[in-house]
Image (spheres, rainbow, N blue to C red):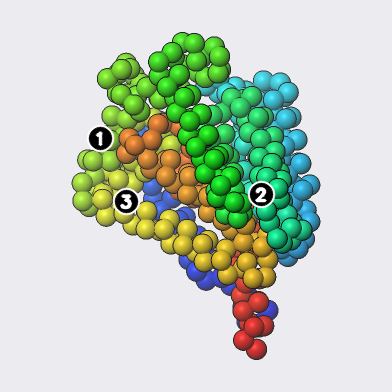
Amino acid sequence: MNKKQSYYMQTDLIMLFILFVCVSLLAIYNAQQLEQYGGENFVLKQVVWFTIGALIVAAVQYFDLEQIYKASLYIYIGGVAILALLLISPDSIAKPVNGAKAWFTLPGLSLQPGEFVKITTILYLARVTSHHKEKYEASNLKTDFMLLLKLIVVTAIPVFLIMEQPDFGTAMVYLFILGMMIILSGISWKIILSLIGAGAAAGGSLLWFIIKFPDIAQEVIGIQQYQVNRILTWFDPTQTSSDANWHFDRAHMALGSGQLMGKGLNGIEVYYSEAQTDFIFSVIGESFGFIGSALVIFLYFILLYKLVTLGLNINKHSSFGSYYSFGILSLILIHVFQNIGMTLGIMPITGIPLLLISYGGSSVLSTMIGLSVIYRISVEQTIQNDYLFK
């Protein structure tokens, strides 16, 4: 292997990917023992998605960060256009599921554009922030407000289209990413604290309104009955019917029944719906116990640590790469916290998958697309370090 080829062998990222693939396939294999979908082979399908994702990672390495930076605007516009197209598409190719028109449903294939647009939005947020910082090296309240407005507008467009589906869980992910990008962009803390106060007041008022006046909230906000039940169950399980509590109860039962070491392969016993997607962490807890669950969380910690160090180090050579790294960190962080949190009962139930582990083509492919750019950033960081020490 020559030196140029060695730059593309990012061993730490490759090993992390292999470990996540192994965890995902083992968990999905156990989840499908429940035979919720007529013995469908989710493991084989997940292998196909991961293989396609690995090929995407390899293909992206033919483009450097400068080219990705220049293309980010057009990629973002393309993502927004697909979201808009989804809303006007006929039900024959965009069938509503649980009241949300969030998927393109083609023969043998279902894709959720909102998952992919998370990546396109992070790309363009990183470009906007990087370009602004280069243009205004000496920041003040005026330039900070300008940057804040840019970031809000860039995020608001896809969020508006996703709320039209409606998909509140996905929209919340976008807003979390926006919040993290605002904090990391260097905007004055006076502005950030004001935003946090206003956001907390608005969010608290909205939750209070939904809890106190659920029927009116459905008409005014457009929230669905099952979403109201999830929020009510989160705050007080005794307020709602047994059907609304069923997911919580079964997820807790499965997680706790694994005890310290778990039941092993083919040992899953507790039945609950969406085991291979939304509640995959319950499968891990039941199958591999507390030790297995802790190791999975530690695996995510290693990935997040890698993104932090990469974002800090690449900032010397590419602020765009740095902001993008932290954007992807935000995406993974909110997905992990929300998914595991709802399994533990500390967060309301949403359809947010556990990235790199939950079954799903859209989830796997969008995450692999996002990480393909991370891999390219890591390659360029390695090249820069090599030049530095020559």
Alpha-carbon distance for marks 3 and 1? Answer: 15 Å
Left or right? Give the position of 331 relative to 30.
right
Residue 373 in which image quadrant: bottom right
**Which residue is labeled 3 in the image?**
293
Residue to which mark 1 is pinned:
253
Pick whichever, 78 or 388, lies toward us.
388
The percent coordinates of residue 270 (x first, y second) are 27, 34
Q: Which residue is mark 2?
A: 141
Disc nearer the start of the sequence (3/1): 1
Residue occupying the point 75% across, 35% down: 81
In terms of secondary structure, where does tag 2 sit?
Answer: helix
Whether residue 373 appears in this view of the structure is: yes
In front of the other: 32 or 152: 152
Please provide percent x and percent y for residue 247.
Answer: 34, 28
Q: Name the amino acid type tagged 3.
A: Ser
Instruction: Please say if 166 is above or below 121.
Output: above
Whole-number angstrom distance, CA of label 2 to CA of label 1: 51 Å
Q: Nearer the viewer, residue 40 or 156?
A: 156
Dot 2 and dot 1 residues touching (CB under 8 Å): no
Q: Nearer the viewer, mark 2 or mark 1?
A: 2
Mark 2 or mark 3: which is in front?
2
Q: Is residue 370 left or right of residue 78?
A: left
Three-letter code for the amino acid on which mark 1 is drawn: Met
Looking at marks 2 and 1 on the same chain, the residue that comes earlier in the sequence is marked by 2
Q: Where, quadrant-wise, is the C terminus in this rendering?
A: bottom right
Residue 308: x and y in percent read 51, 62
Q: Secondary structure at mark 3?
A: helix
Say the numbered circle drawn on residue 60.
none
